[in-house]
Image (tube, rainbow, N blue to C red):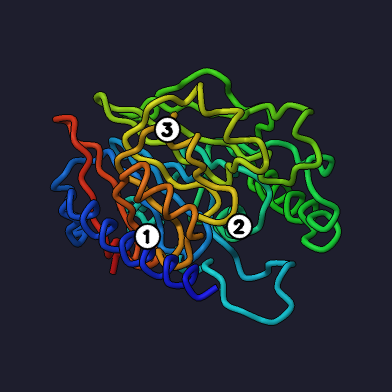
């Protein structure tokens, strides 16, 4: 047992050292909100271990997931979520001269509360409008019994859809299968129709992945796509090589398998979590095998990835607007 523990400790030190080395490939500067790297960017908000991503291109905005709200049915004790933070971020970055925010679309990748919980707050804010809400219809047959019974995913889904309809937003459950343009980004949704073979694997099997492409550079936002749910295997060949990967499932169990990373070959990896909370085997796959530069939204107070007009990806942190 002692030799094993020593080996694990040594490997962890090596992994951390290599992580620092690979992260040094990119100069990550503090965000100044002056557009010095252009206006095509992906904002990975600092919502702890939940997903909230803002896409911006040529003055247009959209959100992919919304972060954890203040009323997660899974939590037994009172807590403070990220509703005000997300709203303040949208107001600070996406509002027009009249203080109004328009989102071309909002995508809920799947019905876990840590991904769609803040949509309730976004959709009921009178200063925010949304062109289209993309959200696959909740199907409990894909999930586990506890997800439906204790986590009340059906109730979460119904409340969000109700809020969107009340505001007159278009709600689309049949997600587009063909790429579409959003400003300078070409966007493609993956796992738009989850095969019945993944029923019973958990709600993560329903996760919608999103690929963004511009000027020869690409990013894949993996939501909670994992190997254990079968969703990695479902999309890996279609997605192909990417430059940036938003790690699936916050770096937890079943995410970023070696097979998946070999298919996608990302040089940059963003995790919506703390670096120290990534599972050891996931960290090993990313650092020791894929040699990816890994950046955590929590440790960096948010990360923004700019896709420049000259074909580069530039990273900034401390992205919360004053």
Q: Nearer the viewer, residue 276 or 84?
A: 276
User: Image quadrant for the C terminus?
Assistant: bottom left
**Residue 119 in sight here:** yes
| Residue matched to label 2 | 124
Q: Residues within 10 Å of mark 3 (few under 14, many from 20)?
A: some
- CB of mark 2 within 8 Å of CB of mark 1? no
**Residue 239 spot, x, y in % from top left:** 47, 26
Q: How crowded is mark 1: few (under 14 residues within 10 Å), some or many (20 or more)?
A: many
Query: Which circle marks residue 262 in the picture?
Result: 3
| Residue matched to label 1 | 296
Q: Is residue 293 left or right of residue 110?
A: left
**Residue 126 in sight here:** no
Question: Which numbered disc, 2 or 1, marks the residue that appears first in the sequence?
Answer: 2
SS class of the residue under badge 1?
strand
Residue at 84%, 40% (x, y): give it: 141
Give the Cα distance between marks 3 and 1.
21 Å
Q: Nearer the viewer, residue 12 or 119?
A: 12
Residue at 29%, 49% (x, y): give it: 293
């Amino acid at each position: 047992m002692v030799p094993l523990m020593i080996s694990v400790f040594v490997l962890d030190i090596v992994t951390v050292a290599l992580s620092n080395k690979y992260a040094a490939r990119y100069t990550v500067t503090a965000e100044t909100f002056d557009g010095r790297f252009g206006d095509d960017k992906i904002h990975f908000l600092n919502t702890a271990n939940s997903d909230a991503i803002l896409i911006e291109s040529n003055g247009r905005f959209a959100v992919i997931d919304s972060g954890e709200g203040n009323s997660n049915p899974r939590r037994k004790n009172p807590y403070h979520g990220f509703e005000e933070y997300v709203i303040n971020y949208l107001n600070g970055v996406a509002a027009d001269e009249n203080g109004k925010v328009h989102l071309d679309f909002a995508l809920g990748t799947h019905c876990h509360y840590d991904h769609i919980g803040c949509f309730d707050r976004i959709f009921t804010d009178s200063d925010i409008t949304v062109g289209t809400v993309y959200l696959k219809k909740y199907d409990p047959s894909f999930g586990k019994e506890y997800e439906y019974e204790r986590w009340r995913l059906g109730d979460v889904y119904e409340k969000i859809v109700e809020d969107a309809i009340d505001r007159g937003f278009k709600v689309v459950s049949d997600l587009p299968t063909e790429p579409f343009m959003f400003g300078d980004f070409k966007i493609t949704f993956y796992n738009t129709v989850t095969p019945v073979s993944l029923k019973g694997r958990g709600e993560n099997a329903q996760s919608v992945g999103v690929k963004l492409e511009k000027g020869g550079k690409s990013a894949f936002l993996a939501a909670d796509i994992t190997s254990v749910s079968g969703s990695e295997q479902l999309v890996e060949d279609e997605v192909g090589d990417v430059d940036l990967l938003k790690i699936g499932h916050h770096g937890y169990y079943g995410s970023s398998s070696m097979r998946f990373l070999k298919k996608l070959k990302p040089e940059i990896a963003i995790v919506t979590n703390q670096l120290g909370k990534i599972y050891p085997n996931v960290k090993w796959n990313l650092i020791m095998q894929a040699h990816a530069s890994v950046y955590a939204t929590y440790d960096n107070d948010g990360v923004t990835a700019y896709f420049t007009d000259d074909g580069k990806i530039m990273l900034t942190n401390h992205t919360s607007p004053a």
